[in-house]
């Protein structure tokens, strides 16, 4: 059995996606991350603008997620975060998510594997952590509960 402990919750603000439709393997989406917050027992702060979620929405409807963002802790430390994951569900549910409706996250699958690059100091322990995230999509935000894999 895999053991985890809560790491933090991210609330990321995102802009409208830039979409390149109809490619040979699906639609490409570039979704700018414009800000947000993260908070947990061991670290908290804000998500800096300039990150992105580069997605491939495959022909089978699965969105492959590739997230790259920077987190600024309350003490000023900057941490790079990378997440690879997927989101999928019944077509009608995913259409509601895409339309910006508030859809219960139990109606679709949204998971990420998360890794970090932190500078020397109080957060360098993150360099040796693999985290997993369970998320949901709001109209202009993404919420992810991240858990450290022990």
Image (cartoon, helix red, strand yellow):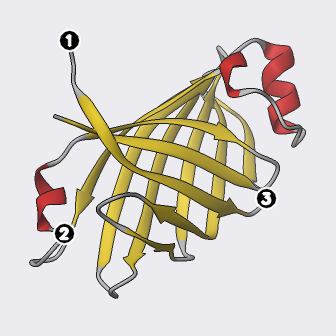
Vertical relation: 15 (above or below) 45: above
Left or right of residue 53, residue 127 in this image = left
The Cα atoms of the two marked residues, 3 and 1, are separated by 39 Å
Q: Where does residue 109 sit, x and y in percent of width and height? A: 59, 21
Q: Where does residue 89 sit, x and y in percent of width and height? A: 69, 16
- The structure residue drawn at horizontal position 17% and vertical position 47%, both measured from the top left corner, is 129
Vertical relation: 16 (above or below) 2: below
Vertical relation: 46 (above or below) 59: below
- Name which quarter of the figure residue 1 lies in: top left
Residue reaching furthest to the front: 41
Q: Where does residue 75 sit, x and y in percent of width and height? A: 33, 86
- The structure residue drawn at horizontal position 39% and vertical position 82%, both measured from the top left corner, is 74
The Cα atoms of the two marked residues, 2 and 1, are separated by 27 Å
Q: Nearer the viewer, residue 83 or 136?
A: 136
The Cα atoms of the two marked residues, 2 and 3, are separated by 32 Å
Q: Where does residue 83 sit, x and y in percent of width and height? A: 40, 46
The circle drawn on residue 123 is 2
The circle drawn on residue 16 is 3
Left or right of residue 29, residue 113 in this image = left
The circle drawn on residue 1 is 1
SS class, disc 2? loop
The circle drawn on residue 53 is none
The crowd level at tag 1 (other Cα within 10 Å; few <14, some 14-19, many 20+) is few
Residues at marks 3 and 1 touching, judged by CB atoms closer than 8 Å? no
Between marks 3 and 1 in the image, the one whose residue lies nearer the viewer: 1
Between marks 2 and 3 in the image, the one whose residue lies nearer the viewer: 2
């Amino acid at each position: 059995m895999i053991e985890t402990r809560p790491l933090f919750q991210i609330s990321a603000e995102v802009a409208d996606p830039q979409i390149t439709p109809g490619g040979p393997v699906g639609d490409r989406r570039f979704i700018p991350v414009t800000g947000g917050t993260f908070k947990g027992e061991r670290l908290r702060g804000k998500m800096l603008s300039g990150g992105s979620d580069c997605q491939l929405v495959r022909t089978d409807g699965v969105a492959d997620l590739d997230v790259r963002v920077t987190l600024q802790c309350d003490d000023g430390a900057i941490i790079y975060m990378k997440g690879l994951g997927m989101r999928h569900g019944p077509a009608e549910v995913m259409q509601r998510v895409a339309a910006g409706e508030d859809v219960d996250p139990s109606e679709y699958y949204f998971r990420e594997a998360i890794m970090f690059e932190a500078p020397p100091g109080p957060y360098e322990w993150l360099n040796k952590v693999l985290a997993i995230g369970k998320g949901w999509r709001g109209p202009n935000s993404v919420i992810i509960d991240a858990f450290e894999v022990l």
